[in-house]
Amino acid sequence: TLILVANYSTFLDSGAVTFGWVIVRDLCNMFFVVVLLIIAFGTILNIEKYNYKKWLPKLILMAILINFSKTICGVLIDVAQIVMLTFVNSFSTIGTGTLVDVLGITEILNLSKTSEEVGFWTVVGAYLLGLAYVIISSIVLFTMVAMLAIRIVMIWIYVVLSPLAYLLSAFPGGQSYASKWWSEFTKNLIVGPVLAFFLWLSFAALTADKVRDTTNIDQVAEKDQVELLGFDPKESGALGTNASSPGALIKFVIAIGMLVGGLKIAQEVGGAAGSMAGKGMAAVNKAGKIGLAGAAAITGVRAAKGIYKNYSSARKSAREDKYKNAAVKMADGIGR
């Protein structure tokens, strides 16, 4: 659904836009006829406020722009869509399966290699963590779909009202409304490329990490982590599943963080879609405090157990060596 909505680009071909724009354009043209009659009478009666020298050039220019307002909007939409579809096309061929994989949702029910026994509470914990994964991911993706859908509807509305914006700009009292139309129309155009960029960035960053070459430094660092923690952070799950491993949690946080970053920028841009981004971020924040904090605590307990186990083993080994050395010294003393 996300890719389908993101790929939408036939804004001007919608029936509502076609018929709505024609009606608004004809109403504006009729209004221009009335204004021209007022200017004619004002010129005849020598009323300076309505003299044709002051109003006629501006009205002629706006009359031309009104009849080409749909074309002008189409050009601006095409520019925004070219940028947006450049990013969308780079990940649309991959499909939603890879998006689910990038977020780590496929690891929810996969048992980790180091899990020896899976009890009832382990299963319950795994499902709760999986539920947190799904809820947070669903909120972020649903917010993006809703923002793109709202963007489509708002662009339709602004294209339909475009003749009115040019008409109002011809009069001092209406210039503020025309300026507001331009501002909101531009914001809704920009939101699409911003969201598409961060979606692409999430794919690019996390899929590239899978094929990144591992250097000797990385291998040494990973070995040190295993020795310190007592388990492989890439394979061991605190709840017996791969989704609860530190690596999977970090991967999930990075992916969601990039997508939430896109929502944050979209909120700063503004527009109707930007207000939707603010609501989505609030929902993600609430879900994240519950889900990710719990997952981090669970994983921290697992890591702490590994560190304590290794520390206890080291202490025990040191004591045994100490006793052995003492016994050897005593034996040497007796032998002498």
Image (tube, grey):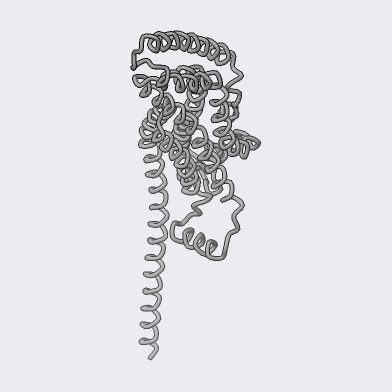
Q: Establish if 50 lies above or below 90.
A: above
* Residue at the image position 36 percent from the left and 87 percent from the top: 333
Q: Position of residue 287 (x, y in %)?
A: 39, 33
List x then y, in percent, for residue 170.
42, 21
Viewer-proximal residue, 99 or 153? Answer: 153
Q: Name the residue located 47 percent from the left edge and 37 percent from the top edge.
A: 126
* Identity of the residue furthest to the right in this view: 93
Q: Is residue 321 left or right of residue 77?
A: left
Closest to the observer, 216 or 127: 216
Q: Which residue ends up furthest to the bottom in the rendered image? A: 336
**Residue 116 at least partly seen:** yes
Q: Is residue 215 left or right of residue 285?
A: right
**x, y (%) of residue 44?**
40, 9
Q: How many marks?
A: 0
Residue 191: percent from left, percent from top? 47, 32
Quarter where residue 216 is shown: bottom right
Q: Is residue 1 visible?
A: no
Question: For the point 41% across and 52% down, which residue is it?
Answer: 303
Residue 256 higher or lower than 273, as above or below? below
Q: Decide: is 331 above or below 268.
A: below
| Relative depth, front residue between 2 and 77 | 77
Look at the image and tell me in which quarter the N terminus lies.
top right
Seen from the viewer's position, the closer of residues 89 and 57 is: 57
Query: Within the image, what quadrant is residue 11 found in?
Result: top right
Q: Quadrant of the C terminus?
A: bottom left
Q: Residue at x 53, y 36 (%)?
A: 196
